[in-house]
Image (spheres, grey):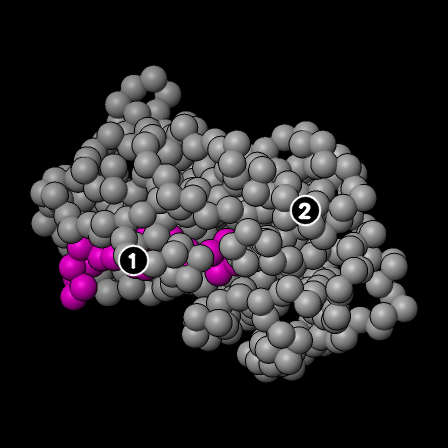
């Protein structure tokens, strides 16, 4: 086996790169994490802040993703109680809503079943007498309100907690560290990166590309050129409004195109999102479009017509989806692990993935690379390893 400085190098300090570094260190591997700017710099700080099973994915038959996400939600509620908290979700059904009450009830029943009928997977029909207490929601033509449970997090803080955990387990974490190139050698890679104002070189047995929207740019820096997937970038915009919805998170249907839009409390304000707009260009330049802001305001006003619509701020992140046809809203959301060689993978590229399932995805990466990495003694189990907020013990 090639003499190496590290068992694996992970490029990208978003939630998925952080998760792989943590999983690798927990498995006893010597790992290096390279992040070019700030941890959670990209999409990992610009999500809808939800740790959820993905109720809407049931409509497109993504049952395994929902089951996995609900399992991961339970794990995160247990190991990161200061970062992930259970929140009531309210789902209003109007005469104009595209899905009828019986359809939504059936979906919620399946969601509960996939959640193993635990207390956190159960749902109820909200009594009509409670509607007036639902933050001033529009009640004209309102037929039914269902309430179920999912979770909310601070996505950037969660990412930093996972990075910190990886470092505590022995991973080397460098920021800012710009990946420059990689050359395939017999049994591994030679990696060049820029850190502390100079170019540095290391050798590793395996390389993980978790660079989010920049994944194919990273592959362009690898020799010989590895295989890659064609991707679509889908922009998701959010707005932050004056005032706060107090009772929980509202799962609404946009009047314009019937997409799901969440209206939720966030840092004493109200967060509304998200959109799905095809994006082309430099990922660094992603910004909410005026039409996206109008779309979100229109949706918010439909459900809360008496509330203030002053936009305090807005932000947007990018989803990476394997290239395909059809609306982004209906496309599969499972992470795609794309190795350079399925029998002897030395480079694995991560395409897409969900915040909720970051830990499970990381475990899959480590298991895949276990085919070529040396046997190590695990030092921790990420299903029980506590995660804490910045500065907490």
Image quadrant for the N terminus? bottom left
Q: Which residue is mark 2?
A: 300
Q: Which residue is tagged 1?
A: 325
**How many numbered discs sit on the rendered protein?**
2
Residue 322 lies in quadrant? bottom left
SS at badge 2: helix
- Compared to 89, does 127 lie above or below? below
Q: Residue at x 69, y 57 (%)?
A: 250
Q: Nearer the viewer, residue 269 or 40?
A: 269
Magenta residue check for 356: yes
Q: Quadrant of residue 255?
A: bottom right
In the rendering, at what x and y percent does residue 120 appear? 69, 72
Left or right, residue 352 beside residue 184: right
Q: Nearer the viewer, residue 392 or 29?
A: 392
CB atoms at circles 2 and 1 under 8 Å apart? no
Give the numbered dot on residue 103: none
**Residue 63 at least partly seen:** yes
- Helix, strand, or loop for circle 1? loop
Q: Is residue 369 magenta?
A: no
In the rendering, at what x and y percent does residue 75 appear? 59, 65
Distance between the alpha carbons at the discs numbered 2 and 1: 29 Å
Residue at horizontal 57%, vertical 37%?
293
The quadrant of the image that shows the C terminus is top right
Q: Identify the residue at image location x=58%, y=62%.
A: 52
């Amino acid at each position: 086996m090639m003499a190496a400085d590290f068992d694996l190098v992970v490029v990208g300090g978003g939630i998925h790169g952080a998760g792989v570094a943590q999983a690798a260190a927990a498995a006893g591997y010597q790992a290096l994490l390279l992040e070019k700017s700030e941890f959670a710099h990209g999409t990992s700080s610009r999500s809808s802040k939800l740790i959820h099973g993905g109720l809407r994915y049931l409509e497109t038959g993504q049952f395994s993703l929902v089951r996995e996400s609900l399992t991961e939600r339970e794990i995160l509620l247990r190991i990161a109680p200061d970062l992930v908290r259970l929140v009531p979700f309210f789902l209003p059904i109007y005469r104009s809503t595209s899905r009828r009450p019986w359809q939504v009830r059936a979906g919620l029943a399946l969601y509960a079943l996939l959640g193993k009928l635990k207390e956190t997977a159960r749902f109820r029909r909200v009594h009509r007498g409670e509607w007036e207490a639902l933050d001033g929601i529009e009640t004209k033509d309102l037929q039914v309100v269902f309430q179920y449970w999912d979770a909310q997090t601070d996505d950037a803080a969660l990412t930093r907690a996972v990075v910190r955990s990886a470092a505590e387990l022995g991973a080397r974490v460098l920021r800012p560290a710009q990946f420059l190139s990689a050359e395939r050698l017999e049994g591994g890679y030679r990696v060049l990166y820029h850190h502390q104002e100079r170019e540095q070189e290391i050798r590793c047995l395996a390389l993980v590309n978790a660079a989010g929207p920049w994944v194919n740019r990273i592959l362009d820096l690898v020799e010989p050129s590895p295989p890659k997937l064609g991707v679509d970038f889908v922009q998701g915009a959010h707005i932050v409004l004056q005032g706060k919805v107090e009772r929980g998170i509202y799962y609404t249907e946009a009047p314009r195109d019937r997409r799901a839009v969440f209206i939720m409390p966030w840092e004493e304000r109200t967060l509304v999102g998200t959109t799905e707009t095809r994006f082309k260009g430099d990922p660094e330049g992603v910004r909410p479009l005026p039409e996206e802001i109008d779309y979100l305001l229109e949706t918010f006003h439909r459900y809360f017509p008496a509330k203030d619509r002053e936009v305090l701020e807005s932000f947007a992140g990018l989803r990476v989806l394997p290239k395909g046809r059809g609306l982004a809203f209906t496309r599969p959301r499972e992470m795609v692990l794309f190795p350079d060689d399925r029998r002897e993978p030395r480079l694995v590229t991560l395409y897409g993935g969900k915040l909720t399932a970051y830990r499970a995805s990381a475990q899959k990466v480590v298991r895949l690379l276990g085919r070529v990495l040396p046997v190590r003694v695990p030092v921790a189990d990420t299903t029980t390893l506590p995660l804490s907020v910045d500065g907490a013990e």
